[in-house]
Image (cartoon, coloured by chain):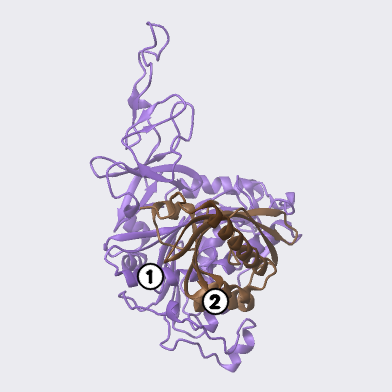
């Protein structure tokens, strides 16, 4: 496994808690135990109960595979899958594993093909992942070969269920998960449709990076509006987000697993921060001004009160609508201490050349070198290092006490609280002192 | 069309040698500024309306325009340098560029087209020195008062999965 930090920082054995010892502290709503980020057994259960459980997982944008035979490598949880468009125009998602000897046969990130052939023994699969051909099936000179009762139909790849909405493709291992729209809940569907209106998307490119932190931290970070006004001085200085701006932290009312962090940019380019708030914000820099302000321009192209939204769709998708820079981020868990992030940046097919350039310029805010992106990555790395190596073991989420779910204040941890209420239930975790 | 595809060089050998020497000197200074952390001196290597972009090989090969860093003009580079030097939060680090030989591709009215491969080694506190980027500068230089300036620099990195982030310009 790819891991960027390996010289110092092996997880303390005491933090790699076995599953049967994973009991949440009694003050469950206001605490997160370190082992949610560090236990290997817990991570394995997450793969089973969450990523292969009753969830819809993002796998692709339709714009990446517009034509029959187009395919891309993707992931559901940490499991490699292939997303391909068949001759009949439908999209199939299947595991990238040859049914014969297990080889991960699809090696290119994307391409176009008539069939998939495993290079090892050249078993071939159609665009839906069904086994088509087995070389020397009947042997040579009447010797060897497959048994008479071998049926290709019984030996395809493992195929997943597929759901789509306005050009976004999801897959599921579950036969019992609710339909996608119901899974998302109404408010999430509404925000989803603000970005994905059905207008044809145009992929502008990809970023990929490894974050040395647990995959859930990425969700938490986007359900934590508190950090946005403090860590990201860039946002504050340039008035993109200021404590006191019109904003919301929404958590879906049904499960609390999806969220939307939204804020409305004021008309002034630069923020004015009151003396009282300034004292609370160490990172505030008075008087910094850009030499080129174009990348902060906001073209009002969406029917939404929010100029910025970061939407977390459980368990593996972030939809970024940061003014006019748009993207999806695909979380690929990589063990308890690591995740791979795949960013697909896009605009719309009918964008003018100038609009496309504006999106590219504004892209400087996000991604592994983005003014906001890199600070988040650094902060989450610091947290993972802290929880792996320290002697204490509890995190505190006490802001906005008593509230679970949506909050109108940025100084709140109510959405993180809601996510972990849901998480404990789906992971079947007990709370210390609670009745079994 | 892949604008980063190989194109043979038709220039005379003596001209190539002279330009290569000049570009190597330019790049040594450019990397010295970045590797010493003199970030705010970095935009001076570019023309006023230069394009500076950092992007993956995958994007370059597919003709996709996105950049991890996408600066149109020296003013945007200045803003990035100031933001990183004065406002951004990240763990302290050293970077070291190891430059390969410059390859001169063409010289014409639009300037000098050249490529230089490099490795970027990053060293963190309590961390290993790691190979952070395997990359190549795809450049177009122009001459201003007898010195070279970058009119275009595309940093195209083969490295497919970046380790956490890219803090400093490459």
Is residue B71 visible in the rendered structure shown here?
A: no
Question: Which residue has dot 2 on it?
Answer: B145
Numbered label attached to residue A357: 1
Quick one: which chain is brown? Answer: B
Vertical comparison of B145 with A174: above or below: below
Quick one: which chain is purple? Answer: A
**Residue at image coords 37%, 6%:** A142
- Please state if A123 lies on the left or on the right of B139 as rendered: left
In-front residue for pair B14/B4 = B14
The secondary structure type at the circle numbered 1 is helix
Rendering quarter of residue A399: bottom right
The image position of residue A218, as x and y in percent, is 54, 61
Would you call the spot at circle 2 few (<14 residues within 10 Å), some (14-19), or many (20 or more)?
few
Q: CA distance from mark 1 to mark 2?
A: 31 Å
In-front residue for pair A217/B80 = B80
Vertical comparison of B87 with A28: above or below: below
Q: Which is closer to the viewer, label 1 or label 2?
A: 2
- Please state if B60 lies on the left or on the right of B166 as rendered: left
**Residue at image coords 51%, 51%:** A332
């Amino acid at each position: 496994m790819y891991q960027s930090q390996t010289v110092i920082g092996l997880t303390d054995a005491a933090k790699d808690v076995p599953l049967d010892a994973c009991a949440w502290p009694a003050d469950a709503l206001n605490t997160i135990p370190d082992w949610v980020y560090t236990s290997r057994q817990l991570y394995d259960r997450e793969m089973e109960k969450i990523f292969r459980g009753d969830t819809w997982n993002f796998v692709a944008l339709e714009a990446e595979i517009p034509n029959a035979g187009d395919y891309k490598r993707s992931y559901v949880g940490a499991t490699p899958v292939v997303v391909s468009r068949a001759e009949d125009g439908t999209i199939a998602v299947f595991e990238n594993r040859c049914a014969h000897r297990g080889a991960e046969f699809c090696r290119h990130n994307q391409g176009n093909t008539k069939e998939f052939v495993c290079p090892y023994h050249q078993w071939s699969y159609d665009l839906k992942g069904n086994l088509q051909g087995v070389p020397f099936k009947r042997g040579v000179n009447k010797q060897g070969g497959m048994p008479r009762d071998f049926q290709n139909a019984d030996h395809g790849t493992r195929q997943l269920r597929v759901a789509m909405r306005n050009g976004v493709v999801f897959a599921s291992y579950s036969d019992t998960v609710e339909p996608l729209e119901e899974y998302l809940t109404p408010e999430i569907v509404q925000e989803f449709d603000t970005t994905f209106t059905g207008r044809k998307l145009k992929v502008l490119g990809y970023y990929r990076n490894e974050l040395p932190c647990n995959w859930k931290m990425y969700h938490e970070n986007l359900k934590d509006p508190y950090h946005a006004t403090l860590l990201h001085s860039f946002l504050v200085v340039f008035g993109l987000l200021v404590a006191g701006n019109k904003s919301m932290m929404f958590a879906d009312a049904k499960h609390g697993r999806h969220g939307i962090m939204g804020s409305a940019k004021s008309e002034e380019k630069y923020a004015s921060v009151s003396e009282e708030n300034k004292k609370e914000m160490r990172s505030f820099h008075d008087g910094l001004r850009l030499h080129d302000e174009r990348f902060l321009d906001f073209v009002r192209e969406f029917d939404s009160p929010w100029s910025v939204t970061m939407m977390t769709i459980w368990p593996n998708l972030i939809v970024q609508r940061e003014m006019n820079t748009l993207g999806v981020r695909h979380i690929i868990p990589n063990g308890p201490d690591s995740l791979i992030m795949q960013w697909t940046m896009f605009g719309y097919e009918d964008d003018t050349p100038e609009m496309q350039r504006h999106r590219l310029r504004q892209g400087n805010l996000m991604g592994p070198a983005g003014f906001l992106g890199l600070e988040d990555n650094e902060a989450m790395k610091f947290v993972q290092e802290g929880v792996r190596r320290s002697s204490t073991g509890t995190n505190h989420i006490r802001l906005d006490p008593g509230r679970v779910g949506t909050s109108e204040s940025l100084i709140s941890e109510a959405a993180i609280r809601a996510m972990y209420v849901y998480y404990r239930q789906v992971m079947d975790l007990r709370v210390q002192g609670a009745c079994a | 069309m892949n604008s980063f595809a190989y194109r043979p060089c038709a220039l005379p050998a003596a001209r190539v040698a002279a330009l290569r020497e000049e570009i190597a000197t330019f790049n040594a200074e450019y990397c010295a500024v970045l590797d010493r952390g003199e970030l705010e001196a970095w935009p001076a290597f570019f023309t006023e309306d230069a394009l500076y972009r950092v992007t993956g090989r995958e994007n370059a090969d597919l003709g996709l325009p996105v950049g991890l860093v996408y600066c149109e003009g020296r003013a945007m580079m200045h803003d990035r340098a100031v933001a990183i030097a004065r406002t951004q939060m990240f763990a302290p680090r050293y970077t070291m560029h190891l430059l390969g030989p410059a390859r001169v591709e063409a010289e014409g009215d639009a300037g000098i087209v050249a490529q230089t491969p490099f490795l970027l080694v990053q060293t963190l506190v309590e961390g290993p020195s790691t190979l952070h980027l395997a990359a190549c500068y795809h450049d177009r230089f122009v001459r201003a008062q007898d010195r070279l300036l970058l009119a275009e620099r595309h940093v195209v990195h083969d490295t497919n999965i970046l380790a956490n982030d890219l803090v400093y310009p490459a």
